[in-house]
Image (spheres, grey):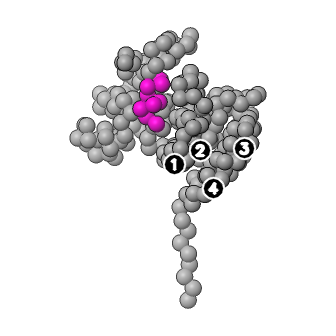
């Protein structure tokens, strides 16, 4: 009697968006070498990335922030605004660790950012983290980046964003606000659970409820909202 093979977990579907063909090729070889993920599409600009995302429905898009024509920022806005792509997570790739466009990308709906000089293991871990949606990508670095630019004033739209976020914060319970502050500090669910002496599942519930009430796609946007609303203040180094 033949044994029926048990199908493994569905691989993470990755879309690559970068105008440099050589980099896309390198990323493709790296991603496809992992048994739990595979590349399902390649785009050379943001417009193509958006159209491919609608067609292949990736779990994660590795998006170069600077591309000719429609750049990564515009493409991220398009993906985030499309209800049919609500489950797609965008990881922004940037040449520089400190880049004002990264903050704009997070506001537009990106799940986080990663420097192009990151080690292969960091890139693969970033894909897995973004696909799981459980933790903010590079929390300390992202938090520091957001704090830096918000401390500088950010932009003309910040006043409107701050008022809107502050109003929505009123819908949070005391515990949800407490959890939001700890999320903005870059703590994982396990770390927050230890701090509050509750279970990680309870923390996850609070995080999910906060995201729903604040209209945030993921934890990265929760961090932005925490700063923009004034709930968390950037600390001068």
Earlier residue among tags 2 and 4: 4
Which labelled disc corresponds to residue 22?
3
Quarter assignment of residue 204: top left
Earlier residue among tags 2 and 3: 3
Residues tagged 2 and 3 counted as in contact (Cβ below 8 A): no
Q: Secondary structure at mark 4?
A: helix
Mark 4 — residue? 32
> Residue visible at 60% across and 31% down?
95
Residue closer to the observer: 53 or 138:
138
Earlier residue among tags 4 and 1: 4
> Mark 1 to mark 2: distance in Å?
16 Å
Which labelled disc corresponds to residue 121?
1
Mark 2 — residue? 60
Q: Secondary structure at mark 2?
A: strand
> Mark 3 to mark 4: distance in Å?
15 Å
Earlier residue among tags 1 and 2: 2
**80 left or right of 161 in image:** right
Residue closer to the observer: 225 or 214:
225
Dominant SS type (magenta): helix
Earlier residue among tags 1 and 3: 3
As displayed, is residue 208 above or below residue 11? above
Q: Is residue 141 magenta?
A: yes
> Residue visible at 35% across and 41% down?
189
Crowd tier of the residue under label 2, counting other residues whose Cα lies within 10 Å: few below 14, some 14–19, many 20 or above: many
Which labelled disc corresponds to residue 140?
none
> Mark 2 to mark 3: distance in Å?
20 Å
> What residue span does the magenta drawing correspond to?
138-146
């Amino acid at each position: 009697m033949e044994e029926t093979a048990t199908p493994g977990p569905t691989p993470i579907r990755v879309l690559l968006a970068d105008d440099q063909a050589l980099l896309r090729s390198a990323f493709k070889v790296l991603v496809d070498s992992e048994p739990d993920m595979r590349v399902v599409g390649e785009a050379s600009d943001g417009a193509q990335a958006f159209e491919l995302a609608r067609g292949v429905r990736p779990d994660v898009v590795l998006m170069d922030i600077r591309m000719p024509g429609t750049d990564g920022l515009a493409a991220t806005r398009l993906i985030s605004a499309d209800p049919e792509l609500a489950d797609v997570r965008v990881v922004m790739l940037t040449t520089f660790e400190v880049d004002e466009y990264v903050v704009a990308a997070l506001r537009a709906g990106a799940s986080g950012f990663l420097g192009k000089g990151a080690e292969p293991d960091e890139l693969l871990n970033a894909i897995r983290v973004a696909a799981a949606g459980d933790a903010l990508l590079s929390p300390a670095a992202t938090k520091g980046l957001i704090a830096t630019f918000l401390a500088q004033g950010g932009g003309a739209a910040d006043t409107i964003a701050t008022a809107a976020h502050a109003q929505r914060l009123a819908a949070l319970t005391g515990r949800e606000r407490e959890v939001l502050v700890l999320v903005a500090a870059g703590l994982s669910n396990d770390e927050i659970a230890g701090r509050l002496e509750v279970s990680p599942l309870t923390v996850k519930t609070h995080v999910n409820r906060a995201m729903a009430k604040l209209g945030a796609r993921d934890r990265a946007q929760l961090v932005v909202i925490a700063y923009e609303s004034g709930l968390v203040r950037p600390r001068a180094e």
